[in-house]
Image (cartoon, rainbow, N blue to C red):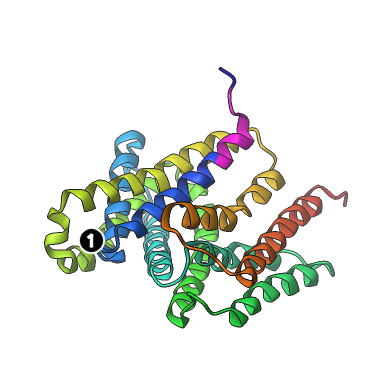
Amino acid sequence: MRSPGPVGLVLAGIVSVQVGAALSKGAFDEATPTTMVWVRLATAALVLLAFVRPRFAGRTRHDLLVALAFGAVLALMNWAFYQAFARIPLGLAVAIELLGPLSVALATGRRRSDALWVLLAGAGVALLGFERSGVTLAGVLFALLAAGCWAAYILLSAATGRVWPGLSGLAVASLVGAVGLGFYAVPAAGGDLLDTSVLVTGAVAGLLSSVVPYSLELIALRTIPTHVFGTLMSLEPAAGAMAGLLLLGEELGLGQYAAVACIVLASAGVARRATRVAVAPD
């Protein structure tokens, strides 16, 4: 049997993330988004800690503070994202959240062509205002909060990777996020955490949305060019829209599909631009 290759691994990870999110949303009638995201984070933390087994001996105060900050942002990002797609279609929530890494990529470059990608992404956001079916202000604001957290996540992920080897920093951050959110989520969940279906769905979502994609991406990034990876990750909103349609029956309007397409194209364009800049001769 042929290996799927690095591109296939990234695509599988993208599908896995969105299927996990769709499964979580399908359980919102049984438990709140906060409960579901906490079970997901707790599952991911337990699995990562079991397999990675990070070492704390010899860690400096700076190392621990970086992991704490990373964990706090990780928890807030996931919580805000779950609050967003509880209120708006999954594909739209993913598209808006993608503005976070897009803004980070744009901030690192000063090329005239960047204006095109800014306008294209802005047009995508503006299109959401013309077709408001299934769109709420609260959902959009939560998605924007998740986008800001994703931008911070990228910066903190790089900082964490410099002082924690492999996935050990992510494992510690996942533990921090699960414990931190748990102070609010566990008392608020009450008896929901005794519901087997809630625990199973949340655990499966944790595997599909965290453990599986992180592992696949780690393997793929050993051989795949950065611009290819960035371009493929731009497909997240499209995958979210398809998962929402097939698993949740969420149908987007023509304008909403156009909004998703604008943001996907802007993100893909910036990803390719970033690599051309990186390899350009001095």
**Residue closest to the eye, 150 or 158:** 150
Compared across the picture, whether 28 is left or right of 70 comes to left
Residue at left 60%, top 35%?
Answer: 8
Q: Eyeballing the image, is 39 above or below 5?
A: below
Image quarter for residue 178? Answer: bottom left
Q: Quadrant of residue 67?
A: bottom left
Camera-side residue of 259 and 222: 259
| In magenta stretch: residue 7 | yes
Q: In the depicted view, which residue is nearer to us: 246 or 164?
A: 246
Disc 1, SS: loop
Magenta segment: does it hold 230? no
Residue 223 image position (x, y, % from top left): 65, 33
Give the tally of numbered discs. Answer: 1
Where 112 falls versus 157 (above or below)?
A: below
Q: Residue at x 52, y 68 (%)?
A: 147
Percent x, y for residue 3?
58, 23
Q: Main secondary structure of the magenta part?
A: helix
Q: Position of residue 164 (x, y in %)?
A: 45, 45
Residue 201 left/right relative to 242 = left
Considering only vertical position in the picture, is 28 above or below 140?
above
Q: Is residue 80 left or right of residue 269?
A: left
Q: Residues within 10 Å of mark 1 (few under 14, many from 20)?
A: some
Q: Measured from the top left, where is residue 162 in percent x and y?
A: 52, 48
| Residue picked out by circle 1 | 30
Identify the residue shown where x is 88% and y is 49%.
281
Q: Is there any visible trace of residue 63 in the rendered image?
A: no
Q: Residue furthest top?
A: 1
Q: As rendered, which of 180 and 29 lies closer to the eye? A: 29
Residue at x-position 41% and y-position 59%? 74
Range shown magenta: 3-11
Amino acid at circle 1 = Glu
